[in-house]
C-alpha cells in the first residue's frame, strides 16, 4: 500500500508552526523593546546617576578650623598644613610587612607603630590611618619615587592644630583628638554628619569642645572623574570648604601666663573676672599640661604620666575642685545678715575666744578672744566667734537661700566643655540638701549644731574657685551678676562679622548700697590693718580682699601646727579680692591646695596678679610664700 498525504493538512501545520514562531519572535522582541524602554526612558535618570557614580567620585575637602585669639589678638590655637604617610588597611595586604618595608624609605619609630595600632582599633578597615606625620620634603620625594611598591599607602596633606603657647591656658582652651564612636553618636544626634565627612578630629575639652560646631566650618567637595581602577583622571567640579569661625576671647594671655608662673610648682587654681561683664581674664588650674601632646594622638607613655601623676594635671581645679571656702565666706555671711536685718554694722558681741552650743565648745583661734567685735572688726581680723553666733541666729535655710543668689552650690554655666558636664556644682548645705544626700533617717536630720561651722566656711560647705570668683565679682558689681564666659566675639571668617557672646545680667540681687559699702570698707581694711596687710604693703592701689584657710581634716580639739602635719593634710589657703576697690575692673579668687594660711600662700599670688593687671609690673618668678604672715592670720 502506498502512503497518502493530505497537502492541506500539511500546509495548515506549517502555517501554524510558522505563525507560532513569528509570534514567539514578536513577543520576545516586544519584551526586549519594553525592557529597553524601561531602562532607557523610564529608568534613564536612575541609571545615569549610577553610571555617574561609577565614573565620578566625591572627595570631601576638610575646612580650616577656626583660630582662637586672646583679648589682644594673641593667637592661642591655630592650624598648619603638613604631609602625612597613611595606610588603608583593607588595601595594604600584610600590614607588618608593609610597615617593615616602609621603614627602609621613611623613618618610622616604635612610637609611630604603637600609635598606628591604637588608631587602627578605633578606625574602620577602609579608612586611611597615619603611620607618620609631618613628613619632610625629602621624605615625601623618597616615597614618591617608590610609591609603586606600596599599594594602599599614600602621602596626604593634612591640617594640624597647634597651640603656640603650649601649656598656657590649656584648661581653658582644651584640645582636639581623633573622632571616636562616642563623638560620632554626638554628631549624629546633632544632625551634622555631612559636615564631618573627611574629618578625623574633634574638640575634646574646653573651648575646643564647647564651640566645636563654630570652629569646625563647612566641608567642601571635589568631583573627580575616575577610571575603572579608581585612579583620578581629572577634576570636574570643586565646591570650596568654608573655614570655621574664629573665637576672640576675654582672656588676657599675658595675665594668664604670669598667674601660672606665680603658682610655681604649687597645686591650686585662680579665676579672675571682669565684674562689669563676667568676662574671664584668667583661668588657671595648676599644674597644667601641653595640649599639643594630643594633636597626633597622645602616646601611651604620655597618657599614663598625665593620668597617674599625683598632682592630677588633667583635672581642672577651677571648675571641678570643690573646697571649703574658709574665712572667705565671712564677707558674704555679713552681707546676708545686713540684707536680712539680722545685724547692723555697729552691733557688737563680746568675744571670749569661744562659743558654747549645747555640750560643745566652738573655739576661736585667738585665746582670750578679740574683745568687743562689730561687723568691721569681724571681717578685718577674721573673728570666728562672731560668725558662730551669726550662723546660729540666721539658721541654715536662711543662709542657703541667700548664698544661692550669689551662685554658690550651682554650676555657673561657663562656656567650657560640652554643656555643663565639665563643671562641679559644689555643695550648698541646707535641710533639703541633707535629706537628698543621705539615705538613713537619722542621717537626713539637720542638727542645729551643724549650722555653727557653716558660718566660718567649714562644715558641709564646698564650692569651686569659679563660684567663689563669681560671687566676689557680683559683690564688686553691687549685686549685678553676669555669667562667667571666655568668648567675647565669634568672628565669621566669611563676612568678618563679629557676634558678641557677652550675656545680659543673670540677675540683680537689688543689694542696698549702704550694705555693700559696709562690706567693701571692711574688705579694704583686711589689707590695711588685718590679715592681708603684709601681702599688700605698699600697694599704690586700694584692694578689697579677704584671706581664708580651710581645714582638710578634723583637728579634734588639737592645735594646728603646719610643720607637724603631712603636706597633703595641710590646710588649703584661699584669698578673694577685687580692685580698685572704688571702681573694680578685676575680681578674683585664689586657692592653693595644702598651702597653709591664706595670707601665707594665696594672698602673695593675688598681689602679683593685681600688680601686673593694674600696674603692668612684670614679676621675676613665682610668688614667694610669706611665712611671717602665719602669726598675723586669725582664721584657724
Image (cartoon, grey):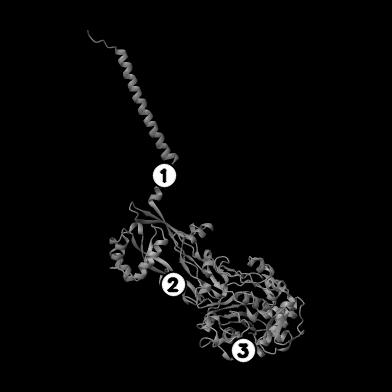
As drawn, the label of residue 536 is 3
Q: Mark 2 Cα within 10 Å, few/some/many (few <14, many 20+)?
A: few
Location of residue 142 in the rendering, given as x and y in whole percent from the top left corner: 29, 68
Comparing marks 2 and 3, which lies closer to the viewer? 2
Location of residue 586 in the rendering, given as x and y in whole percent from the top left corner: 62, 80
User: Quick one: 187 or 245, which is closer to the camera?
Assistant: 187
The answer to whether any part of residue 279 appears in the image is: no
Q: Quadrant of residue 449?
A: bottom right
Callout 1 touching callout 2 (CB < 8 Å) = no
Q: Identify residue for label 1.
A: 47
Q: Identify residue for label 2.
A: 304
What is the quadrant of the N terminus in the image? Answer: top left
Q: Quadrant of residue 318?
A: bottom right
What is the quadrant of the C terminus in the image? Answer: bottom right
Spatial separation of the CA atoms under disc 2 and disc 3 = 41 Å
Spatial separation of the CA atoms under disc 1 and disc 3 = 81 Å
Residue farthest along the front direction in this orientation: 359
Amino acid at each position: 500500500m502506498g502512503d497518502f498525504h493530505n497537502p492541506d493538512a500539511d500546509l495548515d501545520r506549517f502555517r501554524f508552526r510558522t505563525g507560532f514562531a513569528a509570534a514567539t519572535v514578536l513577543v520576545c522582541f516586544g519584551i526586549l523593546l519594553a525592557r529597553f524602554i524601561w531602562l532607557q526612558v523610564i529608568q534613564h535618570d536612575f541609571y545615569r546617576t549610577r553610571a555617574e557614580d561609577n565614573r565620578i567620585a566625591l572627595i570631601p575637602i576638610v575646612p580650616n578650623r577656626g583660630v582662637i585669639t586672646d583679648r589682644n589678638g594673641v593667637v592661642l590655637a591655630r592650624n598648619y598644613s603638613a604631609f602625612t604617610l597613611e595606610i588603608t588597611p583593607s588595601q595594604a595586604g600584610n600590614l607588618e610587612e608593609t610597615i617593615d618595608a616602609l621603614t627602609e624609605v621613611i623613618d618610622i619609630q616604635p612610637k609611630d607603630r604603637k600609635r598606628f595600632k591604637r588608631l587602627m582599633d578605633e578606625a574602620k578597615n577602609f579608612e586611611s590611618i597615619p603611620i607618620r606625620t609631618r613628613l619632610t620634603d625629602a621624605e615625601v620625594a623618597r616615597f614618591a619615587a617608590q610609591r609603586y611598591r606600596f599599594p594602599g599607602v599614600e602621602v596626604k596633606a593634612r591640617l594640624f592644630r597647634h597651640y603656640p603657647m603650649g601649656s598656657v591656658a590649656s584648661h581653658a582652651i582644651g584640645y582636639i583628638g581623633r573622632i571616636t564612636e562616642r563623638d560620632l553618636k554626638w554628631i549624629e544626634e546633632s544632625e551634622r554628619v555631612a559636615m564631618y565627612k573627611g574629618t578625623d578630629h574633634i574638640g575634646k575639652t574646653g573651648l575646643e569642645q564647647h564651640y566645636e560646631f563654630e570652629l569646625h566650618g563647612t566641608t567642601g567637595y571635589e568631583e573627580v572623574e575616575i577610571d575603572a581602577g579608581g585612579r583620578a583622571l581629572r577634576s570636574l567640579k570643586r565646591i570650596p570648604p568654608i573655614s570655621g569661625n574664629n573665637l576672640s576671647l576675654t582672656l588676657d594671655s599675658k595675665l594668664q601666663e604670669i598667674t601660672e608662673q606665680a603658682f610655681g610648682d604649687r597645686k591650686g587654681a585662680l579665676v579672675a573676672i571682669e565684674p562689669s561683664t563676667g568676662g574671664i581674664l584668667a583661668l588657671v588650674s595648676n599644674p597644667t599640661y601641653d595640649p599639643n601632646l594630643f594633636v597626633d594622638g597622645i602616646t601611651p607613655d604620655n597618657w599614663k604620666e598625665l593620668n597617674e601623676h599625683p598632682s592630677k594635671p588633667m583635672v581642672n581645679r577651677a571648675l571641678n575642685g570643690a573646697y571649703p571656702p574658709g574665712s572667705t565666706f565671712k564677707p558674704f555671711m555679713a552681707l546676708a545678715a545686713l540684707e536680712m536685718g539680722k545685724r547692723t554694722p555697729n552691733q557688737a558681741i563680746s568675744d571670749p575666744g569661744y562659743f558654747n552650743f549645747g555640750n560643745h565648745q566652738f573655739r576661736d583661734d585667738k585665746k582670750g578672744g578679740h574683745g568687743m567685735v562689730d561687723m568691721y572688726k569681724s571681717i578685718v581680723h577674721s573673728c570666728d566667734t562672731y560668725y558662730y553666733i551669726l550662723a546660729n541666729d540666721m539658721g541654715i535655710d536662711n543662709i542657703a537661700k541667700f548664698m544661692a543668689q550669689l551662685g554658690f552650690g550651682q554650676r555657673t554655666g561657663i562656656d567650657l566643655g560640652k554643656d555643663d558636664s565639665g563643671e562641679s556644682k559644689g555643695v550648698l548645705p541646707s535641710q533639703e540638701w541633707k535629706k537628698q544626700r543621705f539615705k538613713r533617717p537619722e542621717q537626713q536630720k539637720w542638727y542645729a549644731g551643724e549650722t555653727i561651722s557653716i558660718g566660718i566656711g567649714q562644715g558641709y560647705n564646698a564650692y569651686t574657685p569659679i563660684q567663689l570668683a563669681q560671687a566676689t565679682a557680683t559683690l564688686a558689681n553691687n549685686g549685678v551678676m553676669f555669667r562667667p564666659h571666655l568668648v567675647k566675639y565669634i568672628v565669621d571668617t566669611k563676612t568678618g562679622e563679629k557676634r558678641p557672646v557677652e550675656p545680659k545680667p543673670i540677675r540683680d540681687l537689688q543689694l542696698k548700697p549702704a550694705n555693700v559699702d559696709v562690706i567693701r570698707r571692711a574688705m579694704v581694711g583686711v589689707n590695711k590693718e588685718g590679715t592681708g596687710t603684709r601681702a599688700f604693703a605698699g600697694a599704690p592701689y586700694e584692694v578689697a580682699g579677704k584671706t581664708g584657710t580651710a581645714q582638710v581634716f578634723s583637728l579634734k580639739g588639737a592645735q594646728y601646727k603646719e610643720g607637724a602635719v603631712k603636706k597633703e593634710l595641710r590646710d588649703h589657703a584661699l584669698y578673694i579680692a577685687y580692685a580698685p576697690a572704688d571702681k573694680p575692673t578685676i575680681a578674683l579668687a585664689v586657692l592653693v591646695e595644702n598651702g597653709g594660711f591664706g595670707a601665707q600662700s594665696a594672698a602673695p599670688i593675688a598681689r602679683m596678679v593685681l600688680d601686673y593687671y593694674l600696674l603692668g609690673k612684670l614679676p621675676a618668678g613665682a610668688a614667694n610664700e610669706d611665712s611671717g604672715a602665719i602669726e598675723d592670720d586669725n582664721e584657724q
